Image: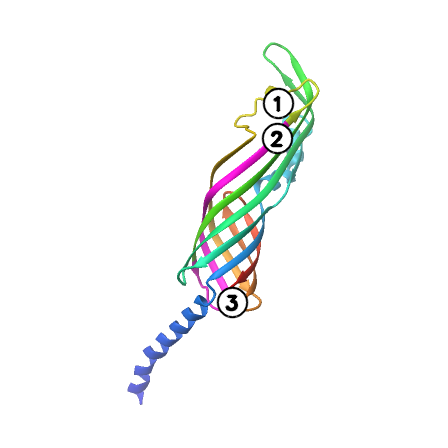
């Protein structure tokens, strides 16, 4: 009897593993709506400190990073997906004073508006994803497409501001590292989650997930 039990142990172990993997692989596609915290919102929180450091009033308004992601699980531990995200920022300073080398002083107000659309791929590595729990780490690799507009009044013109790197529109490489993400499903298909990240377009984000 003891020998029969020893024989059955590997059998049940293999069966349990097979059931676990089958359970996770029945939901290969996951669609997520996300809302995240970005650098512009952090600046928005400290615009009073910026005003003090620059010696003039600065007002910053920023939206969160809103996005959609789609991830497809090729295996129990790896998925590849796409993501699109969007956020905006506005900066205005009603009383800017610029002193030129020739002794001329320019006074006026400036207004800056910009939006960023990020399109990227997301390779994710999953662990502990059994049943209604899914944890992961990974990357986001893509491009951030910018549109922006700078206006000035009074004695100022946009070219007087000499803002380094300013351009009305363009694209740059967007790289993000995701050290940890978590999804918990309240039903078989609908879940809530969050992730922490380093790089654009967010540092922390909440998720509403639907898996198929």
Where is residue 156, by image quadrant?
top right
Contact, CB < 8 Å: mark 2 with mark 3?
no
Residue in the picture at 57% in, 30% down: 168
Q: Which residue is mark 2?
A: 149
Which of the numbered marks, if any, corresponds to residue 158? Answer: 1
- Residue closest to the eye, 207 or 8: 207
Q: Residue at x 63, y 43 (%)?
A: 63
Q: Residue furthest bottom?
A: 1
Q: Looking at the rendered structure, which numbered label has been put on residue 39?
A: none
Tell me the crowding category of disc 2: few under 14, some 14 to 19, or many 20 or more residues within 10 angstroms, Cα based: some
Q: Residue at x 71, y 20 (%)?
A: 154
124 displayed left or right of 43: left
Q: Residue at x 57, y 44 (%)?
A: 86
Q: Position of residue 145 (x, y in %)?
A: 52, 38
Judged from the image, the secondary structure of the residue bearing numbered disc 1 is helix
Label 2 SS: strand
Q: State the CA–CA distance, disc 1 to disc 2.
A: 10 Å
Real-space CA distance between mark 1 and mark 3, rounded to the nearest whole angstrom: 54 Å
Q: Nearer the viewer, mark 1 or mark 3?
A: 1
In the image, residue 74 sits, relative to residue 38, either above or below, namely: below
Question: What secondary structure is found at the residue carrying circle 3?
Answer: loop
Is residue 144 part of the magenta span, yes or no?
Answer: yes
Q: Which label was assigned to residue 132?
A: 3
| Rendered-image quadrant of the N terminus | bottom left
Q: Are the residues tagged 1 and 2 within 8 Å (C-beta)?
A: no
**Quarter of image, res 161:** top right
Q: Is residue 138 above or below residue 7?
A: above
């Amino acid at each position: 009897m003891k020998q029969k039990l020893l024989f059955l142990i590997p059998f049940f172990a293999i069966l349990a593993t097979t059931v676990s993997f089958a359970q996770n692989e029945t939901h290969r596609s996951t669609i997520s709506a996300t809302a995240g915290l970005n650098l512009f919102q952090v600046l928005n929180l400290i615009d009073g400190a910026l005003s003090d450091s620059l010696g003039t009033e600065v007002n910053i308004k920023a939206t969160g990073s809103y996005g959609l992601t789609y991830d497809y699980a090729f295996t129990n531990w790896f998925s590849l997906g796409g993501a699109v995200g969007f956020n905006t920022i506005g900066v205005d300073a009603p009383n800017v004073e610029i002193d030129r080398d020739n002794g001329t002083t320019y006074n006026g107000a400036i207004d800056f508006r910009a939006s960023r659309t990020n399109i990227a791929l997301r390779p994710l590595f999953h662990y502990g994803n059994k049943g209604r729990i899914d944890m992961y780490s990974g990357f986001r690799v893509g491009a951030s497409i910018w549109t922006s507009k700078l206006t000035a009044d009074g004695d100022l013109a946009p070219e007087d501001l000499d803002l380094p790197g300013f351009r009305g529109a363009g694209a740059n490489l967007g790289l993000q590292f995701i050290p940890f993400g978590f999804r918990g499903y309240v039903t078989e298909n609908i879940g809530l989650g969050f992730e922490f990240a380093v790089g654009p377009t967010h540092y922390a984000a909440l998720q509403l997930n639907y898996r198929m």
